[in-house]
Image (spheres, rainbow, N blue to C red):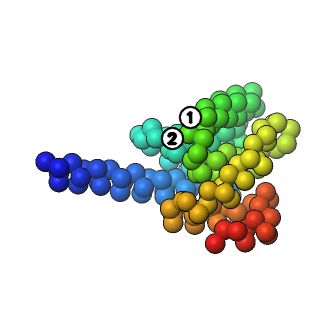
Amino acid sequence: MKLLLSLLTGLCLFFQSADIEALRNSYAKANQSVTNTQSFIDLTEKQSSSDAVTSAYKAAAKIMEARITKEKGKRKSFVKSGATSLENIIKSNPNNAELRLIRLSVQENLPKIVGYHSSMKDDKTFILNSYSKQNTGLKNYIKKFASQSKTFTAADRALLK
C-alpha cells in the first residue's frame, strides 16, 4: 500500500513539475508578441492545478490580458484583478522565490503610470538571498530572467552562480 501511495505521489509531482516548466517557458516568451501572450493566457486557462505557483502564473496572465484586449475599458480591471490575486498569493506564501520572481517581472514590465512597482527592490533582494536554496530548474529560470532584466545589475547577475 505504501509503495502504491509513493508511486502515485511521484507521478503527481512529475506531472506538476512538467506543467510548471511549460508555464515558465511560455511566460518567458509571452512579452515577445501578441501571439505568445495569447498562448500563455490559453495555457494558464488549461491548468487545473491550484497550487500557489500555478495561481501566480494565472494572475500574471490576467495582467497580461490587459495588453492584448481590444476593450480599453477592461485594461484597468484586468491589471487590478491580476495584481490583487498575485499580492494575495504572495502574502500567503512570502518565502516562495518563484512567486517573487513573477511579481518582479510583472512590475518591471508594466508602465510606470500603472503604479504597481512598490515591491521590486524587496523582491530582487529576496531572490538574490534565497537563490542558493532553490532547485536547479528554478535557479536556471532566475538566471535567465536576470540576464535580460533591467532590475538586476551586472553585480547582481554575478551572484547567481
Q: Residue at x 68, y 51 (%)?
A: 126
Q: Residue at x 64, y 47 (%)?
A: 100
Is the residue marked by circle 2 packed among few (<14), some (14-19), or many (20+) residues within 10 Å?
A: some
The tag on residue 65 is none
Q: CA distance from mark 1 to mark 2?
A: 9 Å
Tally the numbered discs: 2
- Relative side of 90 to 44, left or right: right
SS under mark 1: helix
Note whether 105 is above or below 131 in the view shown: above
Note whether 104 is above or below 86 in the view shown: below
Question: Can you see residue 105?
Answer: no
The earlier-in-sequence mark between 1 and 2 is 2
Q: Residue at x 80, y 59 (%)?
A: 150
Q: Position of residue 152 (x, y in %)?
A: 77, 61
Q: Are marks 1 and 2 in contact (CB under 8 Å)?
A: yes
Q: Position of residue 52 (x, y in %)?
A: 51, 41
Farthest-out residue, left: 1
The tag on residue 52 is 2
Q: Nearer the viewer, mark 1 or mark 2?
A: 1
Q: Residue under circle 1?
A: 92
Between 58 and 117, the residue placed more toward the observer is 117
- Relative side of 58 to 70, left or right: left
Note whether 138 is above or below 106 in the view shown: below
SS under mark 2: helix
Q: Position of residue 66 (x, y in %)?
A: 70, 38
- Relative side of 128 to 14, left or right: right
- Relative side of 128 to 20, left or right: right
Farthest-out residue, right: 113
Q: Position of residue 63 (x, y in %)?
A: 67, 39
Between 85 and 161, the residue placed more toward the observer is 161
Q: Name the quadrant containing residue 143.
A: bottom right
